Amino acid sequence: MSAKQPKLETATLGGGCFWCVEAVLSRLRGVERVVPGYSGGKTERPTYQQVCTGATGHAEVVQVTFDPAVLPYRTLLEVFFATHDPTTLNRQGADVGTQYRSVIFYHSSEQRETAEQLIRELNDQGMWPNPIVTQMEPAGPFYEAEDYHHDYYRNNPGQPYCQIVINPKVAKLREKFAHLLQAEV
């Protein structure tokens, strides 16, 4: 008798540059795959150059395939919120524009309800001086980013952006969520 295959779920999240979000979420136990891409816009199959203009309406996102028995959706969202600033509209640090918005593209009513509840709780706790402005939208078309965006942090650790912007996010993840991390190879 073969082992039962896990029931995997998909989450689509945007928290600024997709290189950052991918670098953080790909380290979590229960995450099977993290794919950078674009969602929420009006152009079919947009390119990175098109998305960067802000004219397509897409956000840089990652699509996460995960095992909710190992990593519940709520826990995934807790890491997501803790590793970017969900209170700034259309920006993360120096990255400015609608393509860098904080957004959750939910794949089910349960995901929407979980995200809305967590946002209420985080706002009530006053974790940030300003309220969370993360947008909530039903998941629509997802367009995978060009190959050179995949595993960007792992493939380019010496790049200044990786050292200045992504390293602190990964360090925060290790400090705050060490119990959720996969074993480092």
Image (cartoon, grey):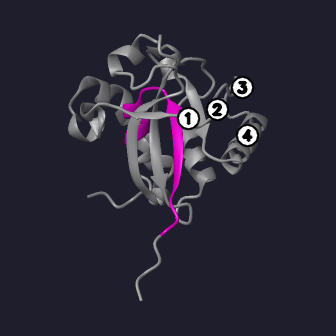
Q: Is residue 108 magenta?
A: no
Foreground pick, 13 / 173: 13
Callout 3 secondary element: loop
Q: Is residue 126 left or right of residue 138?
A: right
Q: Secondary structure at mark 1?
A: loop
Measured Cα–Cα span from mark 4 to mark 3:
13 Å
Instruction: Tell which residue pokes out farthest to the front in this image.
Output: 44
How would you rate the neighbour count of disc 2 (Cα within 10 Å): few for under 14, some for 14-19, many for 20 or more? few
Residue under numbered circle 1: 140
Q: Which amino acid does the dot numbered 3 rest on?
A: Pro
Which residue carries the number 3 mark? 131
Q: How far separated are the C-alphas under marks 1 and 3?
A: 26 Å
Q: Hey, what amino acid is under mark 1?
A: Gly
Residue at 22% across, 34% down: 156
Magenta span:
6-23
Disc 1 and disc 2 in contact, CB within 8 angstroms: yes
Q: Residue drawn 47% across and 15% down? A: 56
First in sequence, mark 4 or 3: give its number: 4
